[in-house]
Image: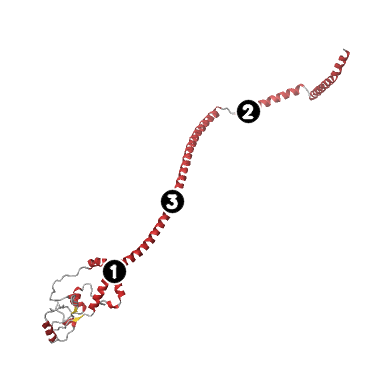
Amino acid sequence: MVDVRRLYHGAGGKVHSRPPAHDPLSTKEHCCSSPAPATPASCGSTLPFEDVPADRGSPPPYDECSSKGQSLKAGLDAAAIVAESLGPDCDRDPDPPEYGDTERRKNVLEPSQGVFFPLRNTDTHVQPIKRKRAPTAAVCTAATSTLDAARPDKLQRSLFAGLDSRLVHVLEQQQQQIHTLQQMFKESQKRNEKLEARCDELERKCGELEDGQSGNVETVENLDIAVDELQARCDALEKQMPDVCDEMEDLKEKWLKECREEFEENERGESIEDSMANQIREGVETELNQIRRRVLRALEPTHVNEEVKTK
């Protein structure tokens, strides 16, 4: 049987199975037989590639195994912690087989008896050697299984305690944030109410201004109409009114002419001396009349008293 994958590990391409345990003679014959000529291990036990091995099936793809391995990650971590705490007695195999090399583990280690069969040629045979670390591995696996069975509750409790403390801290932070958000929301509501009140007042004032503006527009339109009417009337009156300046000029000339004629007539009838004498005479007469009146007023009471005494 040829396994091409084993060529890359330097052990040849031929895989041998364990001989039956009930045939001790064959073991002795193999031990006493003459050894094969010295050839390298990588070439002497290699079979030609024309011999096609039997179809034993390929290992499952990595994607399928990774999904299963993720579910067992927590258990494996706990087992690793327990194995480290037990000490160096539970040393594992430092060079485990590759993921695709599934047949190597089956041929090297017998699960029932823990016997190791090294690779050999067809002409040579070596007696099986017992694996010394098999009991230690068994003890380690047993101890790990018992500790894993005993410690899940403690691990879960510690994990839950840590998670509870973190969750409490996160919840407190969230409550604080919610409280601050509520305060901000209340403040924003108050501001919105104040702004709404201001908006209502501004709308009311705008409505009043619009009403006043509409009234002012109506009055201005009415004034425009009245002004237009007055302008039309003024134009008509200006057309009907005569030229006053010309009339005043005519009146002025007429009055000057009349005054000149009267003055000329007075100068012709009397001279200046006559006029002055007449004026002086008139003034003296007026003065004498006034003095006479005063004397009469002063003499009237005495005359009345004398008449009363005589009676």
Residue occupied by mark 1 = 150
Near mark 3 (Cα within 10 A), the count class, few <14, some 14-19 or many ≥20, is: few
Position of 246 with respect to 184 (left or right) is right
Q: Nearer the viewer, mark 2 or mark 3?
A: 3
Near mark 1 (Cα within 10 A), the count class, few <14, some 14-19 or many ≥20, is: few
Q: Nearer the viewer, mark 1 or mark 2?
A: 1
Q: Amino acid at mark 2?
A: Met
- Residue 16 in the image: state x and y as whole percent: 15, 78
What is the C-alpha distance between the residues marked 3 and 1? Answer: 54 Å
- Residue 12 in the image: state x and y as whole percent: 18, 79
Position of 187 with respect to 289 (left or right) is left
Q: Is residue 202 above or below residue 20?
A: above
Q: Is residue 144 above or below residue 252?
A: below
Position of the N terminus by quadrant: bottom left
Position of the C terminus by quadrant: top right
Residue occupied by mark 2 = 248
Q: Earlier in the sequence, mark 1 or mark 2?
A: 1
Viewer-side residue, 281 vs 286? 286
What is the C-alpha distance between the residues marked 2 and 3? Answer: 88 Å
Q: Earlier in the sequence, mark 2 or mark 3?
A: 3
Near mark 2 (Cα within 10 A), the count class, few <14, some 14-19 or many ≥20, is: few
